[in-house]
Image (tube, helix red, strand yellow):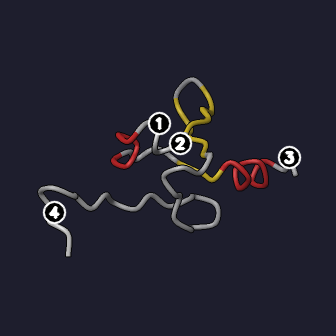
Amino acid sequence: MSDPEVDPVLPLLRCMHCDEVIGAYEPMVIETHHGPCETSLAAHPALYETERPCFHRACYAEARGDV
């Protein structure tokens, strides 16, 4: 069993296209005021708390019709 003070449980971030969980190391796209930004939750853990639209990279391309 893990201790939440030592090993906190991070909230789940879901893709706006497929509604599946975005994994920490998966390539993702977040929509910003300056346009789409490619990153990952591992690179930017603060994104777990974002309210901006987030997508798996492949889902973002599919939603835009790039696939």
Q: Position of residue 21 (x, y in %)?
A: 51, 65
Disc 3 element: loop
Query: Toward which corner of the image does residue 34 lie, by quadrant?
Result: top right
Q: Residues within 10 Å of mark 3 (few under 14, many from 20)?
A: few
Say whether residue 11 is left or right of residue 27.
Answer: left
Quarter occupied by the N terminus? bottom left
Q: Residues within 10 Å of mark 2 (few under 14, many from 20)?
A: many
| Mark closer to the chain start, 3 or 4 | 4
Q: Which residue is mark 4?
A: 4
| Mark closer to the chain start, 3 or 2 | 2
The residue shown at (22%, 58%) is 7
Q: Are marks 3 and 4 in contact (CB under 8 Å)?
A: no
Residue type at mark 2 is Ser
Q: Residues within 10 Å of mark 1 (few under 14, many from 20)?
A: few
Q: How much space separates mark 2 and mark 1, taking CA atoms?
A: 5 Å
Q: How much space separates mark 3 and mark 4, taking CA atoms?
A: 41 Å
Farthest top residue?
A: 34
Q: Which residue is mark 1?
A: 43
Q: Are marks 2 and 1 in contact (CB under 8 Å)?
A: yes
Closer to the observer: label 3 or label 2? 2
Q: How much space separates mark 3 and mark 1, taking CA atoms?
A: 25 Å
Say whether residue 44 is left or right of residue 29.
Answer: left
Disc 1 element: loop
Q: Position of residue 52 (x, y in %)?
A: 46, 44
Q: Which residue is mark 2?
A: 40
